[in-house]
Image (cartoon, rainbow, N blue to C red):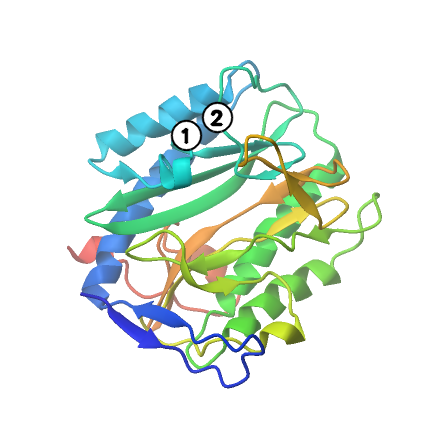
Amino acid sequence: MPVTARTEDPEDKEGVSRMVEIKTPEQIATMRRAGLVVAAVHEATRAAAVPGATTKDLDDVAAKVIADHDAKPNFLGYGGFPGTICTSVNDVVVHGIPDRETVLKDGDIIAIDAGAIVEGWHGDAAFTCFVGTGHAPELIELSRVTEESMWAGIAAFRKGNRLEDISRAIEGYIRRQPRPASGKYGIVEDYGGHGIGTEMHMDPHLLNYVTKKRGRGIKLVPGVCLAIEPMVTLGSPHTHVMDDEWTVKSDDGSWSSHWEHTIALTEDGPLVLTSPDCGRAKLAEYGITVPADPAALT
């Protein structure tokens, strides 16, 4: 069983006593199996995200991949969510519901958020995909900035750091980039990363920016697992939920990008459970050597 440990956060300005699941290496190995299913879903849905496809078509692809791996979807039925994946097109920031009416067009962008459960353990990851061709340079740069800010946050997921160090790395990377033609990048405020393990969403909540109100957050120790997921728009950071009670759009209609990985902190450093190579290539850019892949040891 995972160990549920009380976090050490004497600077928590909210006065909340948080509990965080600490995983064993064996449990992290099972989460890696779930992560590889999610990676397979990403590969298949990326290939299927072409002009003329509906978001329900992508959902069907994801459902088949998960079933073929003898895993279970963790989005389907979660709080009543009706899809296997979230499909968020253009100005939809997150939690877009797959349907037959939303037909992808040349020039669209779509964030595909997918999750899977293996033996009770969860994986969760998202990526932004370009549909067809002819995308504006600022859209390509928006996705690049969002993805790279995620990797900056992952690189800060180190033993001895605190949760805020991840938030600072994400925000700092975004703020250092040249401004887009729209004038600014909006770091979405109402949604962020989270703990993950025996449930998809667990403590701690991870902001993609720094605020004194939250304090420095939990101390990062081996066994902590997080889903790190920046969401960035080409305008306002503010969002609203549509009448379906799921779909989240930017207030000003600006298009957005969403990237996410599930990461485990081990004694030897961060292990990106939903990346095919465990994050080895990207983290090498930060001088980080990734531990051995647990899937290769079983």
Q: Where's the C terminus, which quadrant?
A: bottom left
State the residue lying farthest toward the left. 298
Note whether 60 is above or below 29 in the view shown: above
The picture places residue 84, in percent across and down from the top left corner, at 38, 32
Q: Please determine whether, in this image, residue 196 is positioned above or below residue 250.
A: below
Left or right of 186 in this view: 280: left
How many neighbours does mark 1 have within 10 angstroms: few (below 14), some (14-19), or many (20 or more)? many
- Quadrant assignment for the N terminus: bottom left
Q: Is residue 206 left or right of residue 189?
A: left
User: Residue at position x 40%, y 68% from top?
Assistant: 289
Give whichever of 89, 8 is nearer the camera.
8
Q: Is residue 112 visible?
A: yes
Disc marking residue 98: 2
Q: Residue 264 in the image: x percent, y percent?
A: 36, 63
> Which comes sooner in the sequence, label 1 or label 2?
1
From the image, tell me which residue sits under label 1: 83
Q: Amino acid at mark 1?
A: Gly
Label 1 with label 2: CB-CB less than 8 Å = yes
Under circle 1, the secondary element is: loop
Residue drawn at point x = 33 percent, y = 41 percent: 74
